[in-house]
Amino acid sequence: MNNQDGSLNPLSEPGNLPESEMVVKLKKRDWALSAFSEATAALARAESLDLLIKEVCSAIATQGPYILAWVGKAENDLNKTIRVLGGAGSAIDYVDNIAVSWSETNITGNGPAGSCIRENKPIVVIDSELDDGFVAWRELARKYSIRSAIGCPIQGVDQPFGCLLVYSKLPNAFGLEEVVLFQSLAKEIGFGLQSIDRQHILDDQIHKKEIAQEQLSDALKAIIEAMARTMEWRDPYTAGHQKRVALIATAIARKLGWNNEPVQALYMAAMVHDIGKVAVPSEILTKPTRLSDLEMKMVQEHAETGYQILKDIPFPWPIAEWVRQHHERLDGSGYPWGLKGDQICLEARILAVADTIEAMATHRPYRAARGLITAMQEIRSEAGLLLDPQVVDAAFQLMDAEGTLEQLIASK
């Protein structure tokens, strides 16, 4: 019931109301409860601002006499515009034809939207035909059968975010209980919007970190490749060796089911697995005849030297250790430490197979290339004795009809 001044009376106990009024009161409460229930369910599943507004407004506008719901954002421009973010309902075209403000000096700021933001409390239009503050929209409201409305403020973190507006085709559709429900819903919308904003900020931060990490990874890869090229300039006979070993090793790793990150780490290790040869005199590296025992010992020291060069670089992976172990063998006959079996990390076991294949299949100063078939026969004979049998099997899987391994060996 309304007072003579048009304001709402406090609700009486249902038993004190005439039966017809009590039925209307219960219907109004049921409409609002249904709208509240559906809208809060929509809030829970919304993952974006647009989806939240669309689903919440749709949930409201499908209940009882509610023909329109929309959410507006309070802008801080000169006119203090309320920008419609979205809405739903049979009267949705209404919002395309209205100008709304939350400025107290602007006639478009006297309606429920502007007033609720400015005063930070719910504003009810009992009857759009009688409310003085609704005069700016009265004629348009008639076109869309709007008779009553409620505006509830939506709070932001430090300032008003905007408002929730709900319109009914019936006058006096929003009593005190309905006000409480829609006010609570507006608060929930505010919490939902803040949660989405926080998630977007977090997503942006994660995205920026991913971009930075990708750039860092690309830079690290470029530095590794530059180091490899520098090494190979000293030894033109093995130019491309480290790159081919890297391609073979990563192809093997993919056959073993590795995902991208460890494959890229293995690629970097392979690209510098012989970097320790920088300490070996170039005349030994390019010697066209068999090496003496002393010269062979100097060459074998490249595994430990490579470790010493790389160990203080803060790689995200133990690349220095993989480089140190790439000449270890399962039976303990390798160097520099004579590790056996599982003492040798899997990455180094893959490098050992890839290195053996490439070294045998390509030309060296002291011998002609033995070819891929001979190289594969060699690693098969050493599988389980010197080389990891699973890694060897994966290498043989690259001997497919498309000539994958042949192409890797032939790459420059």
Image (tube, rainbow, N blue to C red):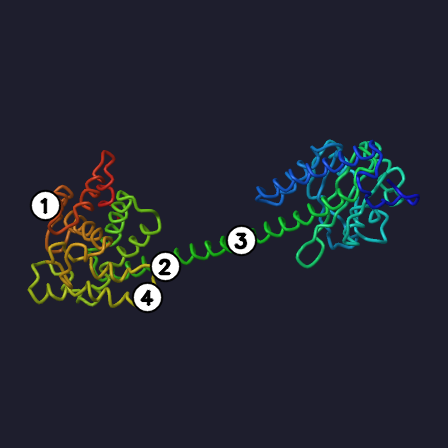
- Please tell me whether mark 2 or mark 3 is closer to you in this view: 3
Amino acid of disc 3: Asp
CA–CA distance between discs 4 and 3? 30 Å
Residue hosting label 3: 204
Q: Secondary structure at mark 2?
A: helix
Secondary structure category for the residue under label 4:
loop
Residue 220 percent across, percent down from the top left:
36, 59
Mark 1 surroundings within 10 Å by alpha-carbon count, few (fewer than 14), some (14 through 19), many (20 or more) = few
Query: Seen in the image, is 59 located left or right of residue 412?
Result: right
Q: Is residue 242 above or below residue 176?
A: below
Q: Which residue is mark 1?
A: 381
Amino acid at pointer 1: Ser
Confirm whether residue 93 shows in the render. Answer: no
Q: For marks 2 and 4, give the CA distance.
A: 11 Å
Amino acid at pointer 4: Ile
- Which residue is more in the foreground, 365 or 134? 134
